Image: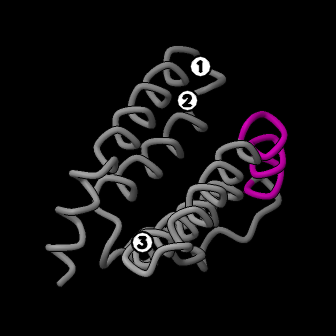
Amino acid sequence: MKILGNIIWLLFGGIFIFIEYLVGGLVLCITIIGIPFGLQVFKLAFVALWPFGRNIESNPNSNGCLNVLMNIIWLIFGGIWIALSHVIIGLLLAITIIGIPFAIQHFKLAAVALSPFGKVIR
C-alpha cells in the first residue's frame, strides 16, 4: 500500500515538490553559509519524494544549543513559509476523503519544515 501511495503521490505533484526542494537546496549550497540549510532542504526533498512509510524522529544525540539556534534562523528566513504552504495544501487535500492520506503527508512535511535541524528520517 505504501508503494501505491508513493506512486500516486509522485504522479500528482510529489515530483514537483521534490524538484523545487532539490533546486532550493542546490542554491543554498552554493554559499558556505547556506550549506547547513541546503542539507536540511535535501532532507525535506527526499521525504517529499517518497513520503509514505517514512518516519521523522528527533535525533537523541543532538541535544545542543546549535540545533536550536539553527532552527530559529531557519524559521525566520523561510521555514515558516514552507511549513505554512504545506499546512494550506494539507487542509485543502483534507476536504476530500480521497486526499486525506496525502494531507497527512503534507502535515508531516510541515512539521519537518518548522524545525529540520535535529531530526532523523527513517
> Which circle's residue, 3 or 1, is located before the other in the chain?
1
Q: Residues within 10 Å of mark 2 (few under 14, many from 20)?
A: some
What's the amino acid at mark 1? Ile
| Label 3 sits on residue | 99
Q: Is residue 105 above or below residue 84?
A: below
Q: Residue furthest front?
A: 96
Q: Position of residue 15 (x, y in %)?
A: 28, 43
Say the numbered circle drawn on residue 32. Answer: 1
Q: CA distance from mark 3 to mark 1?
A: 39 Å
Cβ–Cβ under 8 Å for marks 3 and 1: no
Cβ–Cβ under 8 Å for marks 2 and 1: yes
Give the residues in magenta: 67-78
Q: Quadrant of the N terminus?
A: bottom left
Kindly state the secondary structure of the residue where label 3 is placed: loop
The picture quadrant where one finds residue 78 is top right
| Label 2 sits on residue | 35
The residue at 36%/42% (across/down) is 18
> Which circle's residue, 2 or 3, is located before the other in the chain?
2
Is residue 74 a member of the stretch shown in magenta? yes
Q: Position of residue 80 (x, y in %)?
A: 76, 47
Tell me if 92 is positioned left or right of 15 in this view: right
Q: Is residue 29 above or below residue 91?
A: above
Is residue 99 a member of the stretch shown in magenta? no
- Prevalent SS, magenta region: helix
The residue at 67%/53% (across/down) is 83
50 and 74: which is toward the camera: 50
